Image (tube, grey):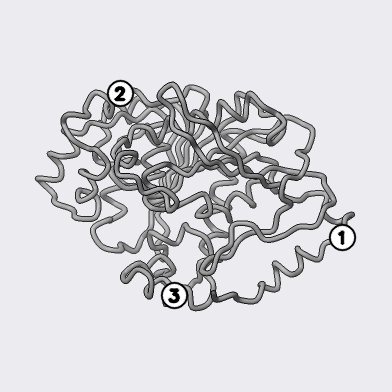
Amino acid sequence: MLRSAPTTALLAVLSLSAAQAADAVGFREATLPGGSGDRPLHISVWYPTDDAAPVAEVGANRVFHGIPAITNAKPAGEARPLVVLSHGYGGSWRNLNWLAADLVHRGYVVAAPDHPGTTTFDRSPAEAARLWERPHDLSRVIDALTADPATAGAIAPHRIAAIGHSLGGWTVAALGGARFSPSRFLDDCKAQPNPRTCGLAPELGIAPENAGSLDADMSDPRVGAVVSLDLGLARGFTPDSLAAVHIPVLVIGAGIDIGDLPAKLESGYLAENLPKASTTYIEIPDAMHFSFMQLCKPGAAELIEEDTPGDGIVCKDGGARGREAIHEQVAGLILDFLAKAIPVK
């Protein structure tokens, strides 16, 4: 297994003294049990902590960097706003690990489930074909954290936001009130064939027989703001439902198309139909679809290509800037947006 040396920044954080570590990131993993129609969920939670225990890198593997955190640390005392994260198709909680750290340092509690069927750790066809369960997964995470302050500290119930990348962007849009029409989506695929999104329809259960589940209201009234990062499947959302979304929405698109996922037809469609007064649309010219994922280690693209040819693209970005610089811009946009929508205090 390839192991790269820690970055200078990571070494600096790992060497913090107990006195310096007062604003550290706490981290823990948990499982929400299934039953009564719900599926078991693995969740990861990041939260502010005053613990002085040693920090270690969490969320790393042989191709991706993690972040410094204190595992199973005691949560800080005061009530905090909550941000739930939704990963993309085939991804995991690790994908937005970098953003979770920035949010915690600003005072937010952050939580992410692995969506069964569409995560790296569970590719069950039966679960993948229940696309409508993805927003419900996030609602269950909100239920669990608001009910149990021992997990990540007390949650301010009226200050909750959702952020998602790719299929996770679709998920948080639905959680914010967008209504999906499978017939609209399938008709659009006939008019504008798109292998990257339309090709997923059978696997995700986007079919007439699932219309009753897919076009249902999947919103959660506790969510007060939504951030979509280069989402897909957007054109299945009905214009009327998007126009009726009453919470602030930040839509960020990738300016460089990886092929059949142009920002203007996905993120742009969302922004065009959402209320103008409460929607911000930003397209980052040199970002690619996977620029919103975590930082890749040296040689990561080649390692991924060896295992799954064609997937090395997840470590490639589009312009002169590196992924770290893109992350810094995206985090700044999100933090500024959330400071107005669901402020820490």
Mark before the other along the chain sequence, 1 or 3: 1
| Position above or below: 235 against 55 | above
Q: 122 or 270, which is in the foreground?
A: 122
Pointer 2 local density, CA inside 10 Å: few below 14, some 14–19, many at least 20: some
Q: Mark 2 = which residue?
A: 216
Q: Position of residue 114 (x, y in %)?
A: 48, 44
Sooner in the amino-acid sequence: mark 1 or mark 2: 1
Q: What residue lies at 35% left-to-right and 67% top-to-bottom?
A: 311
Secondary structure at badge 2 equals loop
The residue identified by callout 1 is 17
**x and y percentages locating residue 40 in the rendered image:** 48, 35
Residue 336: quarter of image: top right
**In the figure, is residue 185 to the left or right of 272?**
left
Identity of the amino acid at label 1? Ser
Judge whether 128 appears above or below 277 on screen: below
Q: Where is residue 265? Give x, y as percent.
A: 26, 49
Q: Is residue 35 left or right of residue 28?
A: left
For marks 3 and 2, the one nearer the N-term is: 2
Q: Is residue 280 left or right of residue 26?
A: left
Q: Rounded to the nearest whole Å, what is the CA distance between mark 1 and mark 3? A: 35 Å
> Which residue is found at the position 40% from the left and 24% from the top?
37
Residue 2 in the image, given as x and y percentages of width and height: 55, 76
The residue tagged with tag 1: helix, strand or loop? loop
Q: Using the image, tell me which numbered label, if any, was put on residue 336.
A: none
Mark 1 or 3: in front is 3
Vertical placement of residue 104 versus 94, above or below: above
Checking the image for residue 303, the label placed there is: 3
What residue is shown at x 56% (from left), y 25% (from top)?
A: 143
